[in-house]
């Protein structure tokens, strides 16, 4: 596949997303409250959302609505705060080990890119249980199922500024390891302007020690005033102006994969995305960066 | 645990069932039709059902409604017919091997009971992919997590008649192997009076070669006129009159576990049932047969 890979069509909500949204809603509701009546009410309201679902939306657009229901019904603005804190602690504790992997490798940048991809396993939105170190070792032995690393490396040498779209808390520590290998660039890290699932927010940027090495830009969680929506023309224009855009995770891929110039670094965690990319589920993918 | 095990409380629909019903509905809808509009309509109608869901019902009562929606919307009275035919063929092909396992064993009845339990893996309602022979070998090495075999064997020696509640097509071949080890008894096999998921019907009794060795009684699929509902007092009374009732699978356990005298033989395939029984998910269980 490699450089001849044609990126998939724009990702739209699929029937498979519906049971998955219900599962996500229940998981989030249980993290948000112990009150079963409220958990039940969350599932009722998400069921109502599913009845009127338009299949012209991207999955993250619907996820915004699902998790807004969870926050509103349970009156908990940040159901995954404890999860994110635990993930940050876990990843920070692994940081010296991650750095050592980079130090010892023949191609520091390549190892750092792979680590940033595998850091994407820290995602309670999709995968429930995992042994992080074991998974990291396994994934480091695997090749990218789609691999645009050579092109990325070449473009990087001429790039002055980089927009880096973050995905989850915890994973931010892996992003930091990569960012420190990108060289002397002007880097803008895009995180969520308010909580949704375990997505990284400004609080996580601080917890993971990135605030002094990047500028921060905010992307919305679906609620007005929380930052740019992924598809906001002004945001898309900012992305176009950057020398390189590096985007992490499924959500950003689902929302932005029609933007050819963006590099997408992700694990294909669900069947819908794996099919879209033409890879096996569980693969790590480094695609995009085309059409400049 | 063993003979001191207290069977679980009556099983009621739980919040975990909701994403599972959505998943089951989608799977069934896709088997019933290739028309995505109809598949979408199925999920809409099941979402509506979920909004009004009463948590005082047992899971099979709700499953009846879910699968009635699939049949009605897709106008396909038997979405799993091809699955059931394939399962019957698969199991019939394995029959000589199953018989040989029984022949070679020290305790023929015990082996046959275990095989009937493991035959329960043939269930597209819960498990999607499996290698049947590998699973059988693994399960034969495992002990029952709850084991009422000794009591069952003792009761069996005095029993004249037996009510045997079947679960799925394909699995019926495993049931036949057990039934042939029960000795000279008057055996009534209870199967569904009309299709629901891959549950065995009269057609499967014939396909699997059981019609000459058992009487057949019908249990409903939730539609009037298809046989006794599991909780019909007349049916419960018939069960009470039998010398032994042996019930297969999760659905029958969920619907009848408040009847102390019934022996339940099943794999605990979902977390809800595993918790209810106090066993690990995936365990084989032979419980009940108490309170005579």
Image: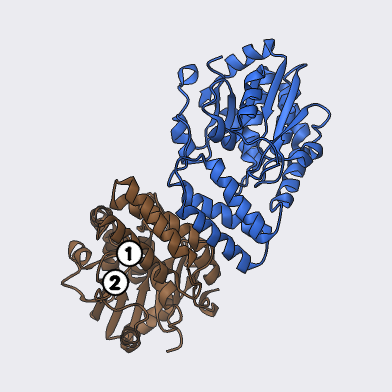
Chain colours: A brown, B blue
Location of mark 2 (residue): A223
Mark 2 neighbour density, 10 Å: few (under 14) some (14–19) many (20 or more): some
Q: Are marks 1 and 2 on the same chain?
A: yes
The image quadrant that residue A182 belongs to is: bottom left
In x, y percent, where is residue B203? 78, 41
Location of mark 1 (residue): A68
Secondary structure at numbered mark 1: helix
Mark 1 neighbour density, 10 Å: few (under 14) some (14–19) many (20 or more): many
Cα distance in 3D space between marks 1 and 2: 8 Å
Secondary structure at numbered mark 2: loop
In x, y percent, where is residue A284? 45, 65
- Is residue B167 at all visible to an observer of this figure? yes
Q: Residue at x 24, y 53 (%)?
A: A82
- Is residue A84 at all visible to an observer of this figure? no
Q: Does residue A41 sit above or below B104 in this rendering? A: below
In x, y percent, where is residue B236? 61, 26
The answer to whether the residues at label 1 and label 2 have Cβ atoms under 8 Å apart is yes
| B137, A220: nearer the viewer | A220
N-terminal-most mark, 1 or 2 = 1
């Amino acid at each position: 596949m490699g450089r001849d890979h044609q990126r998939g069509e724009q990702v739209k909500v699929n029937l498979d997303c519906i049971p998955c949204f219900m599962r996500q809603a229940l998981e989030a509701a249980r993290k948000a409250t112990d009150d079963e009546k409220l958990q039940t009410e969350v599932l009722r309201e998400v069921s109502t959302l599913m009845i009127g679902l338009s299949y012209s939306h991207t999955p993250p657009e619907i996820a915004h609505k699902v998790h807004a229901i969870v926050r509103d019904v349970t009156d908990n603005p940040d159901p995954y705060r404890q999860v994110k804190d635990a993930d940050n602690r876990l990843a920070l504790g692994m940081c010296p080990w991650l750095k050592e992997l980079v130090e010892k490798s023949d191609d520091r940048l390549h190892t750092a890119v792979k680590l940033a991809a595998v850091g994407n396993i820290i995602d309670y939105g999709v995968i429930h249980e995992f042994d992080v170190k074991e998974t990291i070792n396994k994934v480091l032995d695997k090749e990218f199922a789609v691999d645009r690393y050579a092109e990325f490396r070449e473009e990087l040498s001429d790039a002055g500024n980089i927009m880096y779209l973050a995905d989850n808390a915890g994973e931010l520590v892996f992003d930091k390891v990569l960012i420190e290998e990108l060289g002397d660039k002007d880097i803008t890290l895009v995180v969520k302007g308010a909580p949704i699932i375990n997505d990284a927010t400004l609080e996580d940027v601080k917890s993971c020690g990135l605030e002094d090495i990047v500028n921060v830009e905010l992307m919305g969680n679906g609620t007005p005033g929380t930052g740019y929506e992924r598809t906001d023309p002004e945001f898309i224009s900012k992305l176009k102006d950057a020398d390189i855009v590096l985007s992490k995770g499924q959500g950003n891929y689902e929302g932005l994969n029609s933007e050819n110039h963006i590099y997408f670094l992700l694990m294909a965690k669900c069947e819908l995305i794996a099919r879209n990319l033409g890879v096996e589920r569980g693969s790590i993918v480094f695609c995009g960066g085309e059409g400049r």
